[in-house]
Image (cartoon, grey):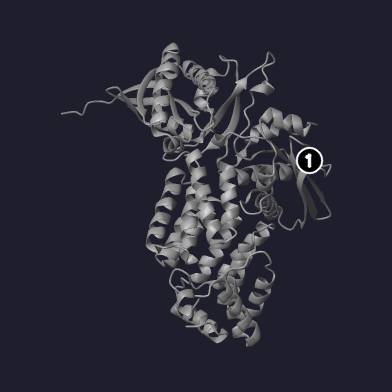
Amino acid sequence: MAEARAQRRLAAILAADVVGYSRLMGRDEAGTLATLKARRSEVLQPVVSKHHGRVVKVMGDGVLIEFASAVDAVECAVQLQSAMDAANVELTEDERIVLRIGINLGDVIVEGSDLYGDGVNIAARLESLADPGDVVISEKVRREVVSKLGLSFEDLGERILKNIAEAVRVYRVSGPTTSTGKAAVSGTVPSAKPSIAVLPFTNMSGDPAQDYFSDGLTENIITGLSRFRDLFVIARHSSFAYKAKAAKVANVCRELGVRFVLEGSIQMASGRVRVTAQLIDGTTDRHVWAERYDRKLEDIFNVQDEVTDAIVGALATSYGGRLRKAWSARSEGAVSPDFRAIDFFQAGQDALGRFTKEDNVRALELFRKAAELDRGYAKPHAKIAWSNIVDVIFGWSDDPAASLTAALAAANEAIRRDDDEAWGHWALGAYYLYGLQQQDRAVVELQKAVEVNPNDADVMTDLGLFLSYAGRPQEGLEWALRAMRLNPHYHDWYTMQLGQIYFDARRYEEGIATFGSLSAVETVLIELYSAACHAMLENKSAAQLAVKQALKFNPGATITLSSTPQRAPYKDPKDLQHFRAALRKAGLPE
C-alpha cells in the first residue's frame, strides 16, 4: 500500500523565546510564571490575532506562530516587541520579560496542528541569533516585505545554521525608514555585542589596478572577524557601499548601527607594501588602536593572508584583543542585565586568568550568568568547562571526578549550542587531555577548533601545549610562537605555557628566560617548571629558590601530587619521568 503523502504548505514562521528565562525562574518561579501567563493572554494573543496568526505551540519560554503572509509576520513581531516594552515599563530590570524573535518563510510539513521541516527549523535558528529585543529575519522574508513596510533591514551577512544545508542571509529589523527610504537614526538598535564595520582599505598607490589587493585584504578581514561568533560584524556589501566616499566615522556608525570602525590604507612601491590600520570608536571619534605593517612583496597573496591574520588576531582575541578591550572600557551608564552577557563573560575571563582559587570560583559564577542571559551564546559554556578543569589541574576541587563530569557536560553543551564556535571543541579537547589523558584525541579537538577559527590565538597557544603533552614539543613550540605573533598583546598564560614547552623540548635556558619574563602571575606550576629547568642546568641555588617559592604557594606540594595524570598528562612515560627527575633534582619532596 502506498505511503500517504505528507501535507505541505508555504508559511511564514515566527519563533520567539524569553531572554534569561532560567535567571527569571531562579529569582521568582511563581512570579515569573504568572507574568508569562499574563503576557500570553494580554499581549501575545491579541497581537497575533490582529495579524491573522496561529499559535502552533508554546514551549516553556518559547512560542511558535504561523502566518499565511510574511508581511503579517513581521508587523506582528515589531508590534509584539513594542507591546512587550510597554508592559515592562513599570517593572524592575530583574522582572522584565524580553523576547528574541526569528522569522522565516518556507515550506512546512503539516501533522495535525503541528508543523515541521526546515521552514520551522530556520526560524528557530534565526531566533537564537537575535539579540534581546530584536527581530531577525531571513532573506526570503526580507524580499517579501522590503517594499511593503516602512522598516529598515540591517544585513548581518550569510550565516551557517546548525543542521541547515545551505547558508542563510540574515537581516535585523532595525527600525522605521524616513521619506527618503533611509533608516531613521532613532530606529537603529545598538548591538549587545562588540560591533564593527570594516571600511574598504584605501589604495594609496595611484594605480587602480592595485585595488584587488586592498579590496581582497578588506574582505579577508571581514571574514576573519566574522569567525568570532561573539562579535557583530557588518557584512561585506554594506561596508563596501562606503568605498571611495569621504564619510565621517560617526555617521558610518550611526548608519550601520555599530560602535567601532576599522579603516586603513595600502601603499605599494619598489617591491614592498605598507599597510596601516586603525580602530576608531564612533561614539567618541577616538583612535583606540593603530598599527603599521611593512612587508616585502615576494608573494602578494601570502602577504595579504599574513597581514589579515595579524590585524584580526590583534583585534579579536578574547585575551588582549584591542576591540574587546575598547568595548570593556566603554562608559555608557546603566545597562540592562539582558544586554550584559558579553560583559559578564569578559569579567569571567579576567577572573579566570588570575589563577587563584577564589578568582576561579568567581569566574564560574560570571560564566553562568552570561550563559543564562544569552542562551545562544556558546562561549560561556566552554569556559564553565575550563573553570572546572582548572579546579582539577590546580588541586582546588573537593571532588575532581565531579568537576570533570561537569566539564564534559558544559563542553558538549557549548558544541550543541553552536558547533561553529571553536571554543566548544577547545573545551572538549581539554577534557580529553586532563580528564581522560587521551592526548591524541585532545589534539584532534584542538586542531578542529583551529580549523573552525584559524585566527583565534587563544586556542592556538593551547594546541601548542597539547602537542607537547602528546610528545611533539617541537610542533608545539611552532604553534605557541605563532599564537604570540598573531596576538601581540597576549596574556601571561601564553608565556607560562611556552616556558613549559621549552622544558619538554629540553631547551632549558630558553625556558628559564621565558619564565623570567613573567611579572604579574605567580603559580605553583610556574615555579615548579622553572625549578625543573634550573635543575637540569645544574643551577642548584636557583632551583632550590624556585622550589621554596612553590612551597610558599602550596606547602603540601610534592613530586607525587605535582605529577598526577591531571596535572602532568604526558603521553610518553619518559616525558613524565623527565619532569619528575628534574623536580627531584631541584629538591622538591617526594
| Residue 523, horizontal then vertical, whole percent | 58, 68
* Tally of numbered discs: 1
Identify the residue at image location x=84%, y=42%. Answer: 206
- Outermost left residue: 1
Q: Is residue 539 something that shows in the picture?
A: no
Residue at 46 percent across and 46 percent down: it is 419
Residue 341 lies left or right of residue 282; in this view the side is: left
Examine the image and state in which quarter residue 293 appears: bottom right
SS for callout 1: strand
Q: 589 or 74, which is in the foreground?
A: 589
Q: Which amino acid does label 1 sit on?
A: Arg
Q: Which of 587 and 243 is in front in this view?
A: 587
Residue placed under numbered mark 1 in the picture: 286
Image coordinates for residue 387, horizontal then vertical, percent: 49, 56
151 vs 60: above or below: above
Q: Where is residue 143 in the image (x, y as percent from the top left)?
A: 54, 21
